[in-house]
Amino acid sequence: MILDIERKGRASWLWLSRPEVRNALNDELIAALETALEVMEKDAAARVLVLAGRGTAFCAGGDLARMEKAATMTKSRSRREASRFARLLYRLQSYPKPVVARVHGPAFAGGMGLAAACDLVVASEQAEFALPEARIGLVPAMVSPYLLRAMGAQQARRYILTGERLAAREAHRIGFVHECVPAADLDAAVGKMCERLALAGPQALARSKRLLLRVQGAALTPQLISETAAALAEARAGGEAREGIRSFLEKRKPSWQ
């Protein structure tokens, strides 16, 4: 199995399971992730997804054998091959359920991109991030939009151009990592994060993620203001909002909890 799925409470943990190559990304692993995301989206019991890695690394990036093969491809075929990973990253970012990256070791190149595309990143103090592409004549193309959103343009510029390693504590300081904890506390920290996320209404979470995609970096225009008002009106009209408000007034838990 190159991808293990484990249920922990309301969360489904997707474990990248190619530890012998530090969970390097190849076509099979990307396809397995695509399938798992499709299945989990339809699973109402899976309220939150956790992306994690077996072995010593979260994900060391692209499989070297795959990269060497890609170097001999025609431009059109290489573009099709690269597009598949690009679609996976977008799928993670736009996924209707919250996705948490559990990073315990190296998250390099595409692995750092996977973390950046998730909604939240919880890392152990031993985790490291890096974008070594420029050092081997490549560019971190598909991951760049997510890196700029996750760490800001100025910090992304540094790590994209230098290829230097980013320690977990520094990643936390600059805002790329949301929580940084000792290795022994990593699973507990991820579990608590999942519990907090599961308190929210599933539809509200999906709507909030769509809203974030729309407003992030958008110009402040009358059209945007109108769209945000429409988003709230749509949420208010739904049964989930009525149940949430009613449960608050009645001092009880809403039905989805």
Image (spheres, rainbow, N blue to C red):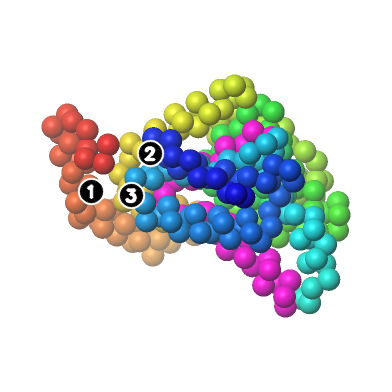
Q: Report the Cα–Cα distance between label 1 and label 3.
A: 14 Å
SS under mark 3:
loop
Q: Amino acid at mark 2?
A: Arg
Q: Which residue is mark 3?
A: 44
- On screen, residue 214 above or below 182: below
Residue 145 locus on image (x, y percent)? 62, 56
Q: Nearer the viewer, residue 233 or 132?
A: 132
Q: Amino acid at mark 1?
A: Glu
Residue 125 within the segment the image draws in magenta: no
User: Residue furthest toward the front?
Assistant: 1
Numbered range of the magenta stretch: 76-105
**Image depth: mark 1 or mark 3 in front:** 3
Residue 16 locus on image (x, y percent)? 61, 46
Residue 80 within the segment the image draws in magenta: yes
Q: Which residue is mark 2?
A: 10
Quadrant housing the C terminus? top left
Residue 76 locus on image (x, y percent)? 72, 78
